[in-house]
Amino acid sequence: MARLPILHLTVPTGLVTVLFLFNLYAAPPIQWEKSSESQESVTSQSAPPTAGLMTDRLSPKQLRIWRALEQIALARNGAGQPLRPVLYELHSWAQTSTIPIYIEMPKARGRWPYLAGECLFDEQGDTLNTRPAAVTIRLYTTVIEKAPSRGRDFESEQAFIPFKGLPREERYCETLAHELAHARQSVTDPGFLPMRDRLKSMNDQVLKLQSLRLVSSVKKEMQAIADQIKVLTSSIEGPAIAVERAVWRELSER
Ligand SMILES: [Zn+2]
């Protein structure tokens, strides 16, 4: 089955952006750095893990970045308490997840330059297709590094400016938290994947109307679809942005 992504952007989101995003489904697969070294390390393990956080798709250099992210996520204070409880708890959930959560850091080459992160769902989870069999999280590190700190529609409503005041690795952590929140919702909320499918179908409808140049003649229908897209996008993005904002606060305070 197709793996439909949820994309996380560093630019204002809205109807046009969302439509543009779903256009990206047809884009060719991304190339990411795969070294023979990382492949060997996988095959040399006697029983590789089949669930939890999976880092075998990362090159040695990317693996070092990942370790730095984990250090930030797992840091504790002098009393042994997690320094960043929301991020710590998310990481712990992912680490002990019953499904594999693959981490990738592909090059942004050939992709929309504002794409910071992506969450893809492998939909063989159950017969009703309400839970994914696996999740892939892609962090576009070079995009995240260069992303300007400015509010997007959702965030400005919640007084939150992504990446503001954060150094490189902490910016990656913020994006990771957003994508992990999507992953967790896809596993714990049976309504999540169907909701995502409805959003995709709404977008397809608009694209179809656009391609037939019917948009101006069906203004009322377009508005109804646009309203539904807005509601669905808020339902999908709202919880992830709330988590991202909480993690941004945790990271900013230290
Ligand atoms: Zn998102």
Image (cartoon, rainbow, N blue to C red):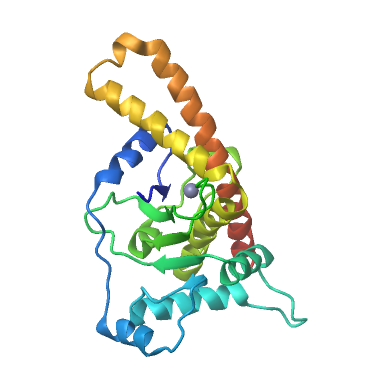
Percent x, y of residue 235: 57, 38
User: Observer-nearest residue: 172 or 156?
Assistant: 172
- In the image, farthest residue toward the right: 79
User: Observer-nearest residue: 251 or 16?
Assistant: 16
- In the image, farthest residue toward the top: 217
Examine the rendering and report whether any part of residue 96 can be seen. yes
Percent x, y of residue 189: 61, 48
User: How many tags in the picture?
Assistant: 0
User: Observer-nearest residue: 171 or 218?
Assistant: 218
| In-image side of 86 versus 175 (left or right) | right
As drawn, 13 above or below 102:
above
| In-image side of 112 versus 99 (left or right) | left
Determine the residue positioned at 49% across, 67% down.
Answer: 100
Determine the residue positioned at 33% across, 63% down.
Answer: 142
Determine the residue positioned at 61% across, 76% down.
Answer: 74
Determine the residue positioned at 39% across, 18% down.
Answer: 222
| In-image side of 151 versus 20 (left or right) | right
Percent x, y of residue 96: 60, 71
Q: Quadrant of residue 15?
A: top left
Q: Quadrant of the C terminus?
A: bottom right
As drawn, 143 above or below 191:
below
| In-image side of 190 versus 146 (left or right) | right
Percent x, y of residue 149: 46, 52
